[in-house]
Image (cartoon, coloured by chain):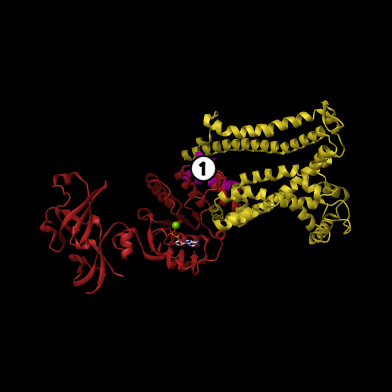
Amino acid sequence: MNDNKRTRFPNRAEWLVTAPSFLWLALFFAVPAVIVLAFTFHGHDASGGVGEWSLSTWRELVDPDYPAIVWNTLRISFEVTLWSIVLAVPCAYAIARMSPKWRSIVAGSIMLPFWTSFVVRVFAWKTMLHPDGWLQACYLVFLRVREWLFGWLPAFLQKALVLLGVASSGPVDPATSTILDSEAAVVLVSVYTFLPFAIMPIYTAAEKFDFSLLEAARDLGAKNFYAFRKIFIPGIRQGLVSAVLMVFIPAIGSYVIPQMLGGTDCVLIGNKIFMRAIQNRNIPHASALATLMAVSVLIPIGLSMWWKKRQDSRDRRRLEEQTARLMTSSMEGGVQ
Amino acid sequence: MDSNGEFLVFDHVTKRFGALTAVNDVSFSVGKGEFFSLLGPSGCGKTTLLRMLGGFERPDSGRIYLEGKDITDLAPNQRRVHTVFQNYALFPTMTIWDNIAFSLRLAKKPKAEIEERVDAMLAMIQMSEHAWKYPNQLSGGQKQRVAIARALVDRPQVLLLDEPLAALDLKLRQHMLLELDTIHDQVGITFLYVTHDQGEAMSLSDRIAVINKGKVEQLDGPAKIYEAPATRFVASFIGDTNFFSGEIVSTEGDYCTIEGEGFPAIRAYNDKQLKVGQKVDLSVRPEKIRVTLQPPPPEKGASINVYPSTVQDIVYQGVYTKYWIKSGDQRVAALKPHSRFLLDQEPITWNDEVFVWWHPDDGYMVEAQ
Ligand SMILES: Nc1ncnc2c1ncn2[C@@H]1O[C@H](COP(=O)(O)OP(=O)(O)O)[C@@H](O)[C@H]1O
Ligand SMILES: [Mg+2]
């Protein structure tokens, strides 16, 4: 139990081993982050340079478009993460249960797409999402089902559902409702892109999972799905957490997919940053947006850490209470 | 126990894995509340038998009945049969308390009842103060006890134990043996215990089925299995023994004389009334053989087996000293316990000419296959 208690000060050899990666992080992560933050407190000049110290950039950030864009970015990233995890868990489970030979074949083929350029793959999707394609037909069916599901609801509820991205804003029109240049295309291709990043950590956790635990659960009376939910899912929690981070963080920063497949319908904060930095040549403004984005990533992480802490202290309290209860009851038992 | 002799029945059960027949036409029945052991070497099909009872394997043929009900095709969660797995299989993400409460929660028992029963179980295994630890914070013996409590808490019809003590060290194993015995007496549930360790099976079981290559070789009480093995395999697997292979050359009343290659005639008790000409394997346990420098005293009777021999090896084993003795062409093992009285005798050393002797009743014959 004590072996996970490390000494606070590592010895020299440990320092030497960790120093390079530490330096790397400091040089290419910490320093640029500070520079970006510093830029936000500068103005910009017409030639695309960084101007004097000023708060003008933060004042400019009060753009009526931004809240909606930040909300859309978070919402779409959440959707992409959710779908990636929902698809990745059964995949990882299935791969972990295969024979070692098949495991490496399938795990390898999941990585196969990375051998081709990301941009080329997104272009390929552009072809697949063409209005004459079968995906367009599927999309129309999807829209119609959605309309049928939510169309009868009162207007304010519909508005809320549109805000949540569950319902579509306008009526379905086969001529204009194309999957290309839609939010659906962005979510679909993002899930396609990030799925391997979700599968891999979950698979790594699932591979270490002791599947005889599922048998033990069934032996004690659990149905298959119950055992999966109560034993397998908690058992791979570490993998799930990394998978969520591996998908959510790049999804929030993605701009190539919305740029190429989202049209005017789906502009995310990544696209805005790109626009400000490259087209408007306003580096401080782009930096401020990037900072905003980083903060919006850190908030959920901070929240989840706070939640876990709360959960832990609650567990500890429960433990103390229950131990006290057990002690008194065993004392009573002793008297009899 | 007789009236309940049919509590759990294996009826001509066979299980194949490809070309391998892991369980071959096995039939036996277990009484209610009995402590029943399946004993056999590794790979003989014990686990497969348990897994069929647990519902994790389907027999290729044959049926399994529990309290008169055919359970052969039921899913694991549909039978009230719980297993203590060899690696314990405790749920690592749950506390000890939650591990034990698992089956009761599944059965949607009222909260008060769950608490009462889990606490009672924890008290029984003397782990109340560990209730809120996680499995990886426990020692092997503690995990073992939790696994047993978890499987017993909702009072299954049968408790299956698959080599539950194999991972423990010797001292702990002996302690857990006593504890298992106590638990069995307390709960009165039928225990089906799988082991390759004859010592465990002997000390715990009401009855033992000795299994070899997927077949039951003998089903009897521990003493019967040790003293009257049904086959050569049983005699050699349970304890240590000397084998003499030969043929019955004459019978006289309850006794017979055996002759074989490499050793002189041996008299043996012929309880099965085997006929002259029958090929037999005679098993004589080492602890039943005496080794002395002098011939046996005449009052031991003229009918005992006595062979002048040479000591080849002496191995001190603590409780006993083991002598390897060359008798004719046969190497015979004999055990001698230590005591102060032995020191008064002239000690036996290597290459001594000695007499090896035993009573005909101490040999046990099985028909040669
Ligand atoms: N799922 C399986 N697939 C193939 N062969 C198996 C399987 N399970 C067990 N066996 C084989 O069946 C035989 C009996 O196995 P088992 O019942 O585990 O033996 P024991 O528990 O007595 O050591 C062994 O030879 C084993 O290799
Ligand atoms: Mg086994």
Residue B120, percent from left and from top: 51, 45
Examine the image and state in which quarter residue B263 appears: bottom left
Is residue B16 a member of the stretch shown in magenta? no
- Count of all numbered marks drawn on residues in the image: 1
Confirm or reject: label 1 Cβ below 8 Å from ligand 2.
no
Q: Check the image and name the residue furthest to the top.
A: A53
Colour displayed for chain A in the image of the structure: yellow
Can residue A2 be seen by looking at this rendering?
A: yes
Residue type highlighted by circle 1? Asn
Within the displayed image, which quadrant is ligand 2 positioned in? bottom left
Q: Nearer the viewer, residue B43 or B277?
A: B43
Q: Nearer the viewer, residue B127 or A198?
A: A198
Which residue is at 54% across, 30% downward? A10
Q: Is residue B52 left or right of residue B257?
A: right
Colour displayed for chain B in the image of the structure: red
Residue at which label 1 appears:
B136
Residue B77, percent from left and from top: 57, 58
- Which is the main secondary structure of the residues drawn in magenta? helix
Which residue is at 21% across, 65% downward? B268
Q: Nearer the viewer, residue A116 or B193?
A: A116
Examine the image and state in which quarter residue B220 appears: bottom left
Q: Nearer the viewer, residue A323 or A164?
A: A164
Is residue B121 a member of the stretch shown in magenta? yes
Mark 1 surroundings: few (<14), some (14-19) or many (≥20) residues within 10 A: some
Q: Check the image and name the residue furthest to the front.
A: A47
Which residue is at 65% across, 50% downward? A199
Examine the image and state in which quarter residue B359 appears: bottom left
Residue A18, percent from left and from top: 58, 33
User: For the magenta stretch, what is the residue range?
Assistant: B110-134
